[in-house]
Image: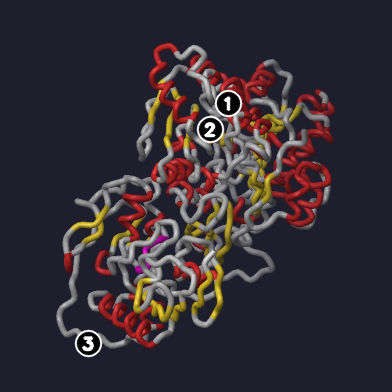
């Protein structure tokens, strides 16, 4: 481990650490534009110049391009280095427009910061500024090429990191242009990261344009709930609505990036159609009174038909607290049971939950280090987009990638695919042996399976990815069996399942006896269930026989919906209890690798001012509360229906949950990166 001195501080770092990172580890920030850890070093901007005073390297050098070595003495504030950086900033500003007041990047712009820090304030060059025409890049990203300083972050991320080629760098010398060959919507499903990466304002967020400066927002970290990966996000809210989502760095999950589905999947929460007021039949009612009315209905039906005539339907978009509260209510009232909507979308999900262990689990970020990846029955780019990006980084580092799937897959990297029918996959997996020739019934796939077998044989850190949506439980078990065989053969094999919902793992973790919706529909058809409470669940979403579901619902005597989305069940419910979203009440979500993470509320809730003010000035109403601020969280609604006082806040709720469900005990002390919780064996 090299020992060096930076600004009179003695520093010891790992071999291969770049000087710019070594300095940052000691609290010394070296200016940079082009350098970004995930993208690596390229030395394009020249603003990270430092003076090497002694050691194997001397003179002015770019700190991002030099690895730390023993005996180095480095100065970041040497007069020559400071003057060099000052001139670099001056020539960057030579063509940059002075439009900070109308630029969405203004106030948190890296170029703005370094221009002020470098003391540049007067343009000495008397010539005209170079200008460009901006491009239309789609409805999500605004393009302002005149602000470009040629740091190359965008093209390197887009083409090298992601593998898409419709945006890049064109031109030469003073006419370099970053964009598309013509106007058009960006093809890259991770293109929103250009907004976060750009150190100026070339790429800005179009939906949140002119909604406020960063300091105007209520900002907090959170957990993305659009798939099962649980990526870290930064949530910005203003005037009681969500304005923007950005990537937040997570060492274990998503690194520094998120997919566009996660970045822009929040607009429903601001919708005017979202349930914000309770409803009893056709009459608008405060949420608490709607819950009381629902409790009365349920008590009468339980007395008339028995407690077994009442059921609850839930889904993986609920928080762990919500799932725990409603499952406990079902158990304490002896209701028919808790039916889990996610089991319709992923019949193999229970195997995934109970197939993981501390020995075989792997984080998504660690997938990038795999030297062989085999994906079974999962279209990563569609089901969990950031997983596809992690697979690409492994491929870029030399890993072999293969897939066994009945669909014709398209991923942004080279891979070998065996297009196999559903009933062939188990045999193909069972035939993979760490040391022997390919076994099992490979049939027409013998050639490709032999190549996969060879990759597995020569790997040290193989990762088996397995879906749960289009495969059955036998396939999920076969994937776990393959990992077990590989580990017995001294390979550090790991298992990575994909699940349909943000908290599918959490729901099955709390109660492995949760039932699939098909059993619910059958019980409604037979008349065994007379009342249904749908909690953040839309049975229509994963139902393959809509006519059958329609008939089953028509046979109910009572339907109650507690939801924050305007679903089809909400529209036909007898009683609607509007509940707050994760952005307003927070919650714990357990991702597909058993990692429980806390997503705090981004704002206090209430109806957006945009709606209460009808697009104009907010209503001039003086009172103790806020419009729409009486919505309970989904877990509080369970207590209201039970006729009990709910826990006073999230902390008290977590305390109750960990006592009622001991498997969740470790969430009380989880760190920022979360904590893994596995089923109790």
The residue labelled by disc 2 is 464
Query: Could you tell me how far apart the alpha carbons at marks 1 and 2 are, in whole angstroms?
Result: 8 Å
Q: Is residue 514 among the parts visible in the rendering?
A: yes
Query: Could you tell me how far apart the alpha carbons at marks 3 and 1 are, in whole angstroms?
Result: 67 Å
Q: Position of residue 426 (x, y in %)?
A: 54, 18
Please say if 477 is above or below 20: above
Query: Could you tell me how far apart the alpha carbons at marks 2 and 3 are, in whole angstroms?
Result: 59 Å
Q: Horizontally, is 177 left or right of 56 in the view?
A: left
Please say if 174 is above or below 442: below
Q: Please give the range of residues in magenta.
A: 196-200
Q: How many marks?
A: 3
Mark 2 lies on a secondary structure that is strand
Tell us which disc is closer to us: 3 or 1: 1
Between 468 and 292, the residue placed more toward the observer is 468
The residue labelled by disc 3 is 124
Q: CB atoms at circles 1 and 2 under 8 Å apart?
A: yes
Quick one: label 2, few (<14), some, or many (20+) residues within 10 Å? many
Q: Quadrant of the C terminus?
A: top right
Q: Earlier in the sequence, mark 2 or mark 3?
A: 3
Could you tell me which residue is drawn at 61 percent across and 60 percent down? 627
Q: Quadrant of the N terminus?
A: bottom right
Q: Position of residue 270 (x, y in %)?
A: 51, 53
Please say if 473 is above or below 320: above
Between 483 and 498, the residue placed more toward the observer is 483
Verify whether residue 539 appears in magenta. Answer: no
Q: Which mark is residue 167?
A: none
Q: Horizontally, is 44 left or right of 274 in the view?
A: left
Name the chief secondary structure element in magenta. loop
Q: Earlier in the sequence, mark 1 or mark 2?
A: 2
Q: Which mark is residue 482?
A: 1
């Amino acid at each position: 481990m090299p020992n060096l001195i930076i600004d009179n501080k003695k520093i010891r770092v790992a071999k291969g650490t770049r000087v710019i990172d070594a300095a940052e580890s000691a609290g010394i920030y070296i200016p940079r534009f082009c350098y970004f850890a995930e993208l690596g070093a390229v030395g394009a901007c020249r603003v990270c110049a430092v003076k090497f005073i002694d050691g194997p390297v001397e003179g002015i050098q770019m700190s991002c391009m030099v690895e730390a070595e023993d005996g180095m003495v480095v100065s970041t504030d040497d007069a020559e280095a400071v003057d060099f950086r000052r001139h670099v900033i001056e020539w960057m500003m030579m063509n940059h427009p002075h439009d900070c007041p109308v630029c969405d990047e203004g106030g948190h712009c890296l170029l703005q910061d370094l221009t002020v820090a470098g003391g540049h304030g007067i343009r000495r060059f008397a010539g005209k500024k170079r200008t460009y025409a901006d491009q239309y890049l789609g409805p999500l990203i605004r393009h302002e090429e005149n602000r470009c300083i040629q740091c190359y972050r965008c093209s390197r991320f887009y083409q090298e990191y992601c593998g898409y080629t419709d945006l890049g760098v064109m031109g030469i010398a003073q006419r370099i242009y970053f964009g598309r060959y013509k106007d058009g919507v960006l093809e890259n499903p991770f293109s929103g990261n250009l907004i976060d990466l750009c150190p100026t304002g070339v790429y800005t967020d179009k939906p949140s344009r002119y909604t406020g400066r960063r300091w105007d927002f209520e900002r907090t970290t959170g957990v993305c709930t659009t798939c099962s990966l649980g990526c870290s996000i930064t949530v910005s809210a203003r005037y009681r609505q969500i304005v923007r989502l950005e990537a937040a760095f997570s060492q274990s999950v998503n690194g520094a990036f998120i997919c566009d589905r996660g970045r822009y999947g929040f607009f429903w929460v601001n919708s005017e159609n979202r349930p914000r007021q309770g409803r009893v039949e056709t009459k608008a009612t405060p949420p608490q009174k709607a819950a009381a009315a629902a409790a009365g209905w349920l008590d009468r039906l339980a007395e008339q038909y028995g407690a077994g005539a009442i059921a609850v339907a839930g889904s993986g978009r609920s928080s762990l607290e919500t799932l725990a509260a409603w499952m406990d209510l079902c158990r304490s009232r002896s209701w028919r049971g808790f039916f889990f909507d996610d089991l319709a979308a992923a019949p193999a999900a229970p195997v995934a939950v109970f197939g993981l262990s501390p020995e075989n689990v792997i984080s998504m970020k660690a997938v990038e280090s795999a030297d062989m990846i085999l994906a079974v029955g999962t279209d990563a780019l569609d089901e969990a987009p950031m997983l596809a990006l992690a697979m690409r980084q492994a491929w870029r580092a030399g890993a072999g990638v293969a897939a066994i799937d009945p669909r014709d897959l398209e991923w942004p990297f080279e891979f070998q695919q065996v297009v196999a029918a559903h009933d062939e996959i188990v045999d193909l997996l069972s035939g993979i042996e760490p040391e022997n020739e390919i076994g099992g019934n490979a049939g027409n796939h013998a050639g490709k399976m032999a190549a996969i077998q060879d990759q597995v044989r020569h790997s040290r850190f193989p990762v088996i990815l397995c879906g749960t949506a289009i495969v059955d439980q036998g396939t999920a078990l076969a994937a776990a069996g393959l990992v077990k065989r590989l580990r017995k053969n001294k390979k550090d094999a790991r298992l990575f399942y994909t699940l349909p919902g943000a908290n599918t793992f959490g729901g099955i973790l709390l109660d492995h006896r949760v039932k699939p919706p098909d059993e619910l529909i059958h019980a409604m058809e037979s008349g065994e269930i007379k009342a249904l409470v749908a909690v953040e669940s839309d049975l229509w979403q994963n139902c393959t026989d809509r006519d059958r579901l329609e008939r089953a619902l028509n046979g109910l005597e009572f339907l109650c919906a507690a939801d924050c989305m305007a679903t089809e069940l909400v529209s036909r419910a007898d009683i609607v209890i509007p509940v707050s979203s994760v952005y307003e009440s927070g919650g714990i979500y357990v991702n597909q690798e058993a990692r429980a993470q806390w997503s705090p509320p981004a704002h206090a809730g209430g109806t957006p001012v945009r709606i209460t003010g009808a697009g104009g000035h907010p209503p001039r109403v003086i009172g103790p509360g806020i419009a729409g601020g009486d919505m309970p969280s989904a877990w509080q609604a369970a207590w209201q229906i039970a006729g009990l006082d709910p826990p006073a806040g999230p902390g008290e709720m977590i305390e109750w949950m960990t006592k009622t469900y001991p498997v969740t005990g470790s969430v009380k002390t989880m760190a920022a990166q979360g904590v893994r919780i596995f089923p109790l064996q």
